[in-house]
Image (cartoon, rainbow, N blue to C red):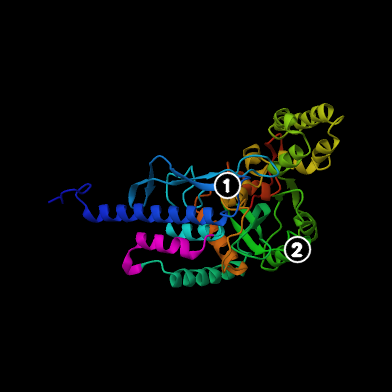
Amino acid sequence: MPVPGTVDGSLIDEIVRDGARRMLTAALEAEVAAYIAAHAGELDERGRRLVVRNGHAQPRQVLTSAGAVEVVAPRVNDKRTDEVTGERRRFSSAILPAWCRKSPKITEVLPLLYLHGLSSKDFVPALEGFLGTGSGLSAAVVTRLTVQWQDEARVFSDRDLSTVDYVYLWADGVHLNVRLDEEKLCLLVMIGVRVDGTKELVALAEGYRESTGSWADLLRDCKRRGMRAPVLAVGDGALGFWSALREVFPDTREQRCWFHEIGNVLSALPKSAHPGAKRALAEIWNAEDRDHARRAVAAFKLGYSAKFGKAVATITDDLDELLAFYDFPAEHWVHLRTTNPIESTFATVRHRTKVTKGPGSKAAGLAMAFKLIEAAQARWRAVNAPHLVALVRAGARFERGKLVERPAQVAA
């Protein structure tokens, strides 16, 4: 017989939902309190605080493993302005971003919170309410999980790579302020596409400012463990990665990331020129084929070289590497133009500008980043037309994105 006052007659579900709601509320309040406290000393000319509370946002439903939970998030009025852009600073919740309508798993929440710089004292008590008093997520449990994840990251970094074949490779350096008082943690991240078209993490290591030496050490280690040279590597043009790649895997072709390249071009232009430049650049990277792309480059050069030679040189100096993707299947172009698999995975944590002080360590930060990517990896989809990846590895030739030569034998 249903219990009065419950949803669908389930008292335990109602209790769990109420616990989830209280957990989120406590965590969000602690996060906002910590943010305001961190900027309590920043005052305007009249001695008033620049960062204060601003009531609560409208209630919204968040889908959790306990069901739909109504959340009322606290708001922050941040009156500070960015010295570089001149734009107002904005508080962004690490626990519940503005776009979030679904909660991640607990195993995904902990790495995310750590990489955002939150101290365990801020979120452990709140998460304990979600897991239950009998098996609460105490600080000791978090410590044990961190040690366990460090061990898992070490096992991953030592695994045999001779049994897998990465045809495409994305590489990027990610800088994170992982609750350290020292310099930021620089992660060297490589994600690959296997012959079957699936994406997976290839390597994750600590690097020194994305130096050539750090990248070379990582690539040599992968080669020692059996990694085969990728057909194409995609990365930011400023990386020390390229010098290292030419040394370790000299036969791998290079593709510059258009996301980074566009940013470099725009930084060399006045803001008034940005809309037109973006359209002109889109005509290049989104062209029908290489010939159309080169004509778009010529048009960009004609329109901007007189006043903005540096912006034009950003494109023309690396033109062959920027257009390399046109030699591959058209279905793969959308994947090969940028380092998006890495960018999207770290989008919520890589641009943090303040370091939250605490007992963080680079080893723990590396382990947490590994768990974050491991969780995200389960949601990565294969590249378009995955059957063509094997043809790329076998040396098939593509023109205008179409297969024009099929090798006699294609590796299974």
Image position of 378 with respect to 400: above or below: below
Q: Is residue 315 visible?
A: yes
Measuring from the top left, give residue 11's x and y in whole percent. Answer: 21, 54
What's the mark number on residue 316?
A: none
User: Quick one: label 1, few (<14), some, or many (20+) residues within 10 Å?
Assistant: some
Query: What amino acid does circle 1 point to?
Result: Leu
For the record, the magenta segment spans 118-135
Label 1 element class: loop
* Residue 397 shows in the view: no
Residue for point 85% across, 30% down = 307
**Relative image position of residue 45 (x, y in whole percent):** 63, 45
- Residue 90: x %, y % from top left: 56, 44
Looking at this rendering, what residue extends furthest in the right direction?
A: 306
Amino acid type indicated by mark 2: Ala
Q: Along the polypeptide, which appears first: circle 1 or circle 2?
A: 1
- Please say if the residues under marks 1 and 2 sit with CB atoms less than 8 Å apart: no
Query: Does residue 265 appear to the left or right of 49 in the view shown?
Result: right
Taking depth in this image into account, of 56 and 189 the one nearest to the observer is: 56
Q: Which residue is mark 1?
A: 50
Q: How far is disc 1 from disc 2 in space, using C-alphas? A: 46 Å
In depth, the one of 76 and 208 nearer the eye is 76
Identified at 84% across, 27% down, the residue is: 302
Disc 2 crowd rating (10 Å Cα; few below 14, some 14-19, many 20+) is many
> From the viewer's perspective, is 272 left or right of 334?
right
In the image, 280 versus 111, the foreground residue is 111
Secondary structure at numbered mark 2 = helix
Q: Please give left or right for residue 200 compared with residue 246 in the image.
A: left
